[in-house]
Amino acid sequence: MADIIHLLPDAVANQIAAGEVIQRPASVVKELLENAVDAGADNIQLIIKDAGRTLIQVVDNGKGMSFNDARLCFERHATSKLTCADDLFRLTTKGFRGEALASIAAIAHVELRTKMAEDSMGTLLLIEGSEVKEHSLIATSDGTSISVKNLFYNVPARRNFLKSDNVEFGHIEEEFNRVVLTHQELSFSLYHNGKLVVQLQPTNLKQRIVNVFGNHFQDKLFPVEQETDFINISGFIAKPENAKKKKSEQYMFINRRYVRHPLLNYAVESAYSELIPDGYKPAYFINLEVDPATIDINISPTKVDVKLQDERLVFGFLNSTVKKSLGQMSLTPSLDFDYEPGMDVSNMPKDMTLKEPVITHNPDFNPFHSHPSSGGHSSSGSSYSKPASSHGDFDTSGWSDFLQSLKTETETLKQEVTETPRLDLQDSPASDPSETQPEDLRCLPVNKKYIVANIGNGLSVIHIAHARERILYEKYLMAIQQKPITVQQSLFPETITLSPAKADLARELKPQLLKLGYDLESIDGTHFAVNGTPNGDEGEDVQQVIELFLEAYHSNLFLHHAEKDQNLAMSMAKQKCASFKPMTEMCEITDFLKQLFDCQISNVSPSGKTIIRQFDAAEMESWFGK
Ligand code: ADP
Ligand code: MG
């Protein structure tokens, strides 16, 4: 019988490979941009027509290709980035599989113009459906220009499958963003149908994010930074109050390559879990630097899915780094030293990268810890001893330390800025807290809802109910996890009645309720004797507190899959918030602020609401015009 197996012609093999690598115009954009970055270009232009259907062109000023390489690069498995299998574990380039150009050439009309700086002539190569139409010497500038026309001209199924121009161009922009956000030191521009859509100059990462997503991002970002022998984590996370219900800007990079990794995404999102409502997504831009030998990027042709050798370790580092950053964020409400409104980067030397000023920051600092006797997580009542007052009823000794620490931070920053002359802090609108003397500080309740205080050279507005929810939440979490609330035993126990379902839940949560100060004893199916209540909360309606607490706990459990301890603390905090009377005495307000700044996180409530808004002098200035 005759043999029937034969090798597929290259053109067919390439077309099959293209099916995996090139799904839509955006896939071509990704491959071409990555090749330009790998070629060492520092200026890259992306030119699109009809959302990539008619033309996708990338022009770079990278190292270019020789006459022969210009032909060879369209062969399958033709790459300059890999020579042996071991190289797979030392990769620092974006590409390595050597199949992108071969795939693209199989399903489009491609025109390549390229020249190496040391050559006097460049090369022109025309190729259609893997067939070389022209290969000649031409005069052209240094670098490479590659034009991909009539994509999928010979694959009607793919061509007809493309979505509207808006959708396809959206995908292109997304791929463009993924590259520009990891290469802030390079210039990029994007044209669509003859119009300039985006132009990006070299800058620092924060400014690049702002340039890509708009000025409103300026105030939303907070740095993440962690360096260890095993992993370096850097980038920015958005403040919790800016989390969005639907899709948010979430960018995870490993060794400056955009990756999709559900576990890493979860590591970031779960760090926010107490700070934002369920279903909300925080924005983040995080790059992880790991040893290339510990990551496998070769598990999918598009290299977006990756496998990490030690996922759990990376998860732990990332999760705790983001948590630490969120904690620091709460201590530096809105003193944004990174803000550089008029920074001119156009005349910067090319080989210089921007160094961002680093704010040295003591995460353990607490403005109210200068009096150890008054510190700690006490109950929301009156167990704080009141330090000596320096201004009427309002004690400013705690603020004094707070201001001193900010002053030190500002000075460190200024020092660093002197070493980095391009960042001119003098023009920065960030407040200089050293201008305020402690005795000038005032705080005032407004409308029973807010406290207004002057911090630094600005103004802080504190939302009382949100702050109270945070204080109580942390108090109850502490009670459950470490230091139970003292129970005041009753001489004549009151009886409460619960529905059968709530009674079951109350029995299940009996040990936790005891830690929260409620000593309940089941009498029968639905009745409980209240043998004790939280010390200091006498006179409350126990029946109502317990009922509403159980109801909140139950619904958090099913609606939001909340973690048990957090759920207990949150549900109790909610009930207790309702029963507070407005503060009238100044000492009550200072006590309250002390407790707030004693919290691990003090600018967002556990249900994700903003607690503090800060307005610095420059911002106030802008309210009234020049
Ligand atoms: P890979 O990037 O995986 O190596 P490609 O098919 O994308 O595979 O590219 C093949 C080769 O062509 C690259 O290894 C590189 O040597 C060369 N090349 C591609 N694009 C450029 C470019 N813009 N400038 C210089 N060389 C390039
Ligand atoms: Mg490539």
Image: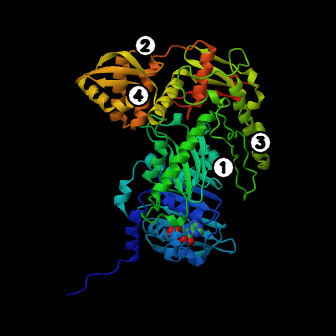
Q: Amino acid at mark 1?
A: Asn
Marks 2 and 3: which is nearer the front?
A: 2
Secondary structure beneath dot 2 equals: loop
**Which residue was labeled with disc 2?**
539
Element carrying mark 4: helix
Nearer the viewer's eye, disc 4 or disc 1? 4
Q: Amino acid at mark 4?
A: Ser
Q: CA distance from mark 3 to mark 4?
A: 45 Å
Residue beneath label 1, please?
204
Can see residue 213?
no
Density class for disc 2 (Cα within 10 Å; few <14, some 14-19, many ≥20) is: few
Would you say the beta carbon of the disc 1 residue lies within 8 angstroms of ligand 1? no
Q: Residue at the spot x=64%, y=35% of the render? A: 332
Please rate how many residues cluster around mark 4, counting C-alpha atoms within 10 Å: few if below 14, some from 14 to 19, many from 20.
Answer: many
Residue 152 position (above or below residue 579): below
Its colouring scheme is rainbow
Q: Which residue is mark 3?
A: 414
Residue 443: percent from the left, percent from the top? 66, 19
Quarter of the image for the C terminus: give it: top right
Foreground of the two, 334 or 27:
334
The image shows residue 301 at horizontal and vertical percentages of 43, 64
Q: Is residue 565 left or right of residue 376?
A: left
